[in-house]
Image (spheres, rainbow, N blue to C red):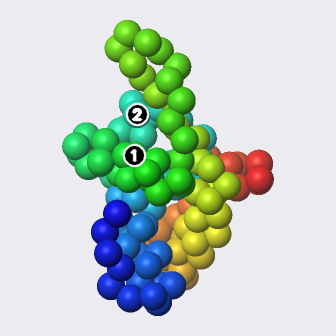
């Protein structure tokens, strides 16, 4: 666990989930992607070493749970915990902001469908 820069909730939240890859992994988990392969197939093409690191960080922070679904080799299914699902509101706010202020953005149909499942 890294020392905090301050007690500011924005600063602390950014230390946990403030890089672009972490929120994209959470976005994809919210969309129903559960395996390493499905997460690696994201259109942003997350490098495999970064994906493995972010999954470990998210699990250590209690945002996801990794459950083995295959023994040889061991493969995991990833699911968001309640704490991780709460980031959905943050991602939705970023998406709304992007749609309003960043030309050429759009919400993918599977994300809209996933949002209705909640």
**Closer to the camera, 32 or 75?**
75
Q: Residues within 10 Å of mark 2 (few under 14, many from 20)?
A: some
**Closer to the camera, 49 or 107?**
49
Q: Residue at x 45, y 88 (%)?
A: 7
Q: Earlier along the polypeptide chain: callout 2 or callout 1?
A: 2
Q: Which residue is mark 2?
A: 36
Q: Are marks 2 and 1 in contact (CB under 8 Å)?
A: yes
Asked which secondary structure carries label 2, the reply is helix
* Residue 67 x, y percent position in the rendering: 54, 29
Q: Which mark is residue 92?
A: none
In the picture provided, is 44 more to the left or to the right than 61?
A: left
Q: Residue at x 37, y 46 (%)?
A: 56
Q: Which residue is mark 1?
A: 55
Q: Residue at x 53, y 53 (%)?
A: 62
In the picture provided, is 109 more to the left or to the right than 113?
A: left
Q: Residue at x 35, y 58 (%)?
A: 21
Compared with 4, 27 (above or below) is above
In the picture provided, is 66 more to the left or to the right than 11?
A: right
Q: Residues within 10 Å of mark 1 (few under 14, many from 20)?
A: many
Compared with 64, 106 (above or below) is below
Q: CA distance from mark 2 to mark 1?
A: 9 Å
In which quadrant will I find the N terminus?
A: bottom left
Which quadrant of the structure image shows residue 51?
top left
Compared with 14, 118 (above or below) is above
* Residue 105 x, y percent position in the rendering: 47, 68
* Residue 88 x, y percent position in the rendering: 62, 63
Asked whether residue 25 appears in the rendered view, the answer is: no
């Amino acid at each position: 666990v890294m020392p905090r820069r301050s007690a500011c909730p924005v600063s602390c939240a950014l230390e946990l989930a403030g890089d672009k890859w972490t929120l994209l992994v959470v976005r994809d988990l919210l969309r129903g992607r559960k395996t390493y392969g499905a997460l690696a197939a994201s259109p942003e093409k997350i490098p495999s070493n970064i994906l493995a690191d972010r999954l470990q960080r998210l699990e250590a922070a209690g945002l996801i749970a990794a459950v083995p679904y295959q023994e040889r080799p061991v493969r995991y299914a990833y699911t968001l915990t309640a704490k991780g699902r709460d980031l959905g509101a943050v991602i939705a706010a970023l998406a709304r902001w992007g749609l309003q202020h960043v030309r050429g953005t759009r919400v993918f149909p599977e994300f809209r469908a996933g949002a209705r499942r909640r």
